[in-house]
Image: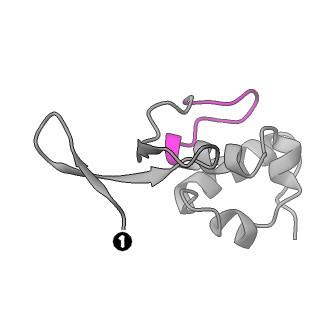
Amino acid sequence: MRPFVMSPCRRAVPQRRHAAGGTLAPMSTRATPEQIGELPKIGRPATAALLAADVTTLDGVAAMGEAELLALHGVGPRAIRILRAALEREGRSLGA
């Protein structure tokens, strides 16, 4: 069970443990940039998922398959459509 804290608006907010140090922090993607380098804007949850998987370029996206991308928490069909369109503009496609 996740620990909860009260937010300033008096709601219980779930928290997650940081990998380093085991401290607790609110679950939020607000600190994640909207866009990384050449990657298109796909939303902060999807961007955070790609950052966590160390994927920061279209080359990295092209090396992954659709199922592999969808397995990342935060990447959904909308992000796949946007990434696929960006790759197609360069004459590339998602990996198998």
Q: Report crowding for label 1: few under 14, some 14 to 19, many 20 or more residues within 10 A (C-alpha).
A: few
Counting from the top left corner in percent of width and height, residue 94 is at: 82, 59
Residue at the (87%, 71%) spot, across then down: 96
Q: Which residues are magenta?
A: 34-45
Quadrant of the snapshot with the N terminus: bottom left
The stretch drawn in magenta includes residue 41: yes
Instruction: Please give left or right for residue 95 compared with residue 48 in the image.
Output: right
Secondary element at image label 1: loop
71 vs 32, left or right, is: right
The residue singled out by tag 1 in the image is: 1
Between residue 82 and residue 23, name the one nearer to us: 23
Q: Viewer-proximal residue, 8 or 64?
A: 8
- Residue 74: x percent and y percent? 54, 56
The residue furthest front is 21
Residue 75 in percent (x, y) is at: 58, 57
> Which residue is painted at 61% across and 42% down in the image?
47
Along the line of sight, which residue is nearer the eye, 1 or 38? Answer: 1
Question: Residue, x 88% and y 50% (percent of image)?
Answer: 92
Q: Tell me where residue 90 appears, x and y as whole percent.
A: 86, 40
Q: Amino acid at mark 1?
A: Met
Identity of the residue drawn at 58% across and 52% down: 79
